[in-house]
Image (tube, grey):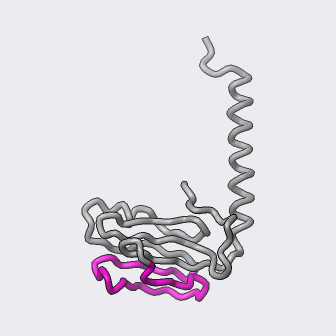
Amino acid sequence: MKLVKKSDSIVILAILLISLVVWGCYTLYYSGTPVVAEIFYESRLVQTVDLGKKEDRIFSIPQNRHVVFHVFEDGSICFKESDCRDKICIRSGRIDTVGQSAACLPNKIVLKIVRKNNASDNDPDIVIG
């Protein structure tokens, strides 16, 4: 008894191929877009960080000094330290593409990547994965 039929393999391969094409198009379309990171505290925008400056720095926001962010020279940003219990925000890693976000829910902080200029209605609200 076969576990996977030939037709199942074709369907799985087609789904993987379509997924790779969509991911590739998305990456190519947004790779050259100038972006900024918006930091929200309790749903209020408290700081905007320009990721195009190519600087390496570590900082925190005045609303919560226990949460530390790290901006890298390659234009990505991540949570560096947090006093939350589960540390999911730190494990979310670097983000750098329009629509990506990370959050430290116990500290009520959300980090979101958006276009630098003229945000569009066609921009993704969130990127998963």
At horizontal 29% and vertical 82% (from top left) the residue drawn is 65
Percent of width and height locating residue 123: 66, 66
Percent of width and height locating residue 78: 45, 72
At horizontal 72% and vertical 52% (from top left) the residue drawn is 22
Q: Kindly report the secondary structure that dominates the magenta region of the rendered protein.
A: strand
Residue 67 painted magenta = yes
State the image quarter where residue 102 is shown.
bottom left
Q: Which residue is the extreme one toward the top?
A: 1
What is the number of callouts on the image? 0
Percent of width and height locating residue 129: 54, 54
At horizontal 69% and vertical 75% (from top left) the residue drawn is 33
State the image quarter where residue 84 is shown.
bottom left
| 51 horizontally vs 39: left or right | right
Residue 38 painted magenta = no
Q: Which residues are magenta?
A: 45-74
| 127 horizontally vs 27: left or right | left
At horizontal 74% and vertical 59% (from top left) the residue drawn is 25
Relative height, residue 68 to residue 16 (above, below): below
Relative height, residue 128 to residue 79 (above, below): above
Relative height, residue 85 to residue 96 (above, below): above
| 68 horizontally vs 114: left or right | left
Q: Quadrant of the N terminus?
A: top right
Relative height, residue 109 to residue 116 (above, below): above
State the image quarter where residue 70 is shown.
bottom left
